[in-house]
């Protein structure tokens, strides 16, 4: 107990950084996980991580205000790393929005257990698929390893010109990757439905007595759903690549952080 009390101030730095990560990172930041559970999980992980990273802890300042500033900076480091990962993760919901608009499910909303918000059906399914893949491939463990490694590279957060330039570059790359991944996931269904719309237009011109519009909606729902089921393997592989990209960006921001 005395050992813990002697290291409590340094231990709080580790706890703050891990808590910042769990407040923003995919899966950990889910509203279905209460803040109390997040605190307990952060505390338990901190107990495991602290003996490994204790030698990298910054010096404890003598003034309470300075100590509080360092704790807040540790929280921000965790938030930054978690936010970089969550940007690419948002591409899955974006792809679901593309599906909803094209298939015609835009008005059907169900409760998403991850975000606790009402989202279109396909977007919710994509979120659940991405969360399951995130856990299956061990991305949650890799994220904890990355935040543990960050204690060696990032001891005190300082927004210098070099740091700001690096963060902006990583942010731009992450947002670009988000759109690319969303487009790749949505491309099969959007391409097939575009061909269906084109065929309907040609049928309407060739046989004007046919009421093509009355057949359009059920036909798009049937073909879109069938295409979605047929391309699940492809979508899963793109999700894995998207999650790996997000983890690579988080590792890059830690590895390339300027030396202090």
Image (cartoon, helix red, strand yellow):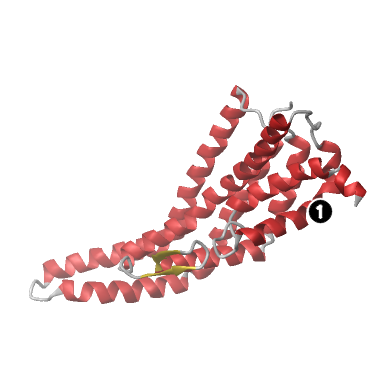
Name the one closer to the observer, 185 or 123.
123
Is residue 245 shown to the viewer in this render? Answer: no
Residue at 58 percent of width and 50 percent of height: 24
Q: Secondary structure at mark 1?
A: helix
Say which quarter of the image contains residue 191.
bottom left
* Badge 1: residue crowd in 10 Å (few <14, some 14–19, many ≥20): some
Residue at image mark 1: 47
Query: In the picture provided, is 238 more to the left or to the right than 36?
Result: left
Residue at 74 percent of width and 34 percent of height: 155
Residue 213 in the image: above or below residue 149: below
Name the one closer to the observer, 112 or 61.
61
**Percent of width and height locating residue 184:** 46, 55
Query: In the picture provided, is 201 more to the left or to the right than 30?
Result: left
Name the one closer to the observer, 82 or 200.
82
Query: In the picture provided, is 219 more to the left or to the right than 246?
Result: left
Quadrant into which the C terminus falls:
top right
**Percent of width and height locating residue 119:** 40, 64
Residue at 69 percent of width and 28 percent of height: 258
Is residue 56 shown to the viewer in this render? Answer: yes
Instruction: Point out the residue furthest to the front here.
Output: 64
Say which quarter of the image contains residue 251.
top right
Residue at 75 percent of width and 44 percent of height: 12
**Percent of width and height locating residue 131:** 57, 64
Residue 11 in the image: above or below residue 202: above
| Count of residue discs | 1
Name the one closer to the observer, 67 or 117.
67
Instruction: Point out the residue furthest to the right here.
Output: 2
Instruction: Point out the residue furthest to the left here.
Output: 209
**Percent of width and height locating residue 176:** 48, 43
Instruction: Point out the residue furthest to the top here.
Output: 161
């Amino acid at each position: 107990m005395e050992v813990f009390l002697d290291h409590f101030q340094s231990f709080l730095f580790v706890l703050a950084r891990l808590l910042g990560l769990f407040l923003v990172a995919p899966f950990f930041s889910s509203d279905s996980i209460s803040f109390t559970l997040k605190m307990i999980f952060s505390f338990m992980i901190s107990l495991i991580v602290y003996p490994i990273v204790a030698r990298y802890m910054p010096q404890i300042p003598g003034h309470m205000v300075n100590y509080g500033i360092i704790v807040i900076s540790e929280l921000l480091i965790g938030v930054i790393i978690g936010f970089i990962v969550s940007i690419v993760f948002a591409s899955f919901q974006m792809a679901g929005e593309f599906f909803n608009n094209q298939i015609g499910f835009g008005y059907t909303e169900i409760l998403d257990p991850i975000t606790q918000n009402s989202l279109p059906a396909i977007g919710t399914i994509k979120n659940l698929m991405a969360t399951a893949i995130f856990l299956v491939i061990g991305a949650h463990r890799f994220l904890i390893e990355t935040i543990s490694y960050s204690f060696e590279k990032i001891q005190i957060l300082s927004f210098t010109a070099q740091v700001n330039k690096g963060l902006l570059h990583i942010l731009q790359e992450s947002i670009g990757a988000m759109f690319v991944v969303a487009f790749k996931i949505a491309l099969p269904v959007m391409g097939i439905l575009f061909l269906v719309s084109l065929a309907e237009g040609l049928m309407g011109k060739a046989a004007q007595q046919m009421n093509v519009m009355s057949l359009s909606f059920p036909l798009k729902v049937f073909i879109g759903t069938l295409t979605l089921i047929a391309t699940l393997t492809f979508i899963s592989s793109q999700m894995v690549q998207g999650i790996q990209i997000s983890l690579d960006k988080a590792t890059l921001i830690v590895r390339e952080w300027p030396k202090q």
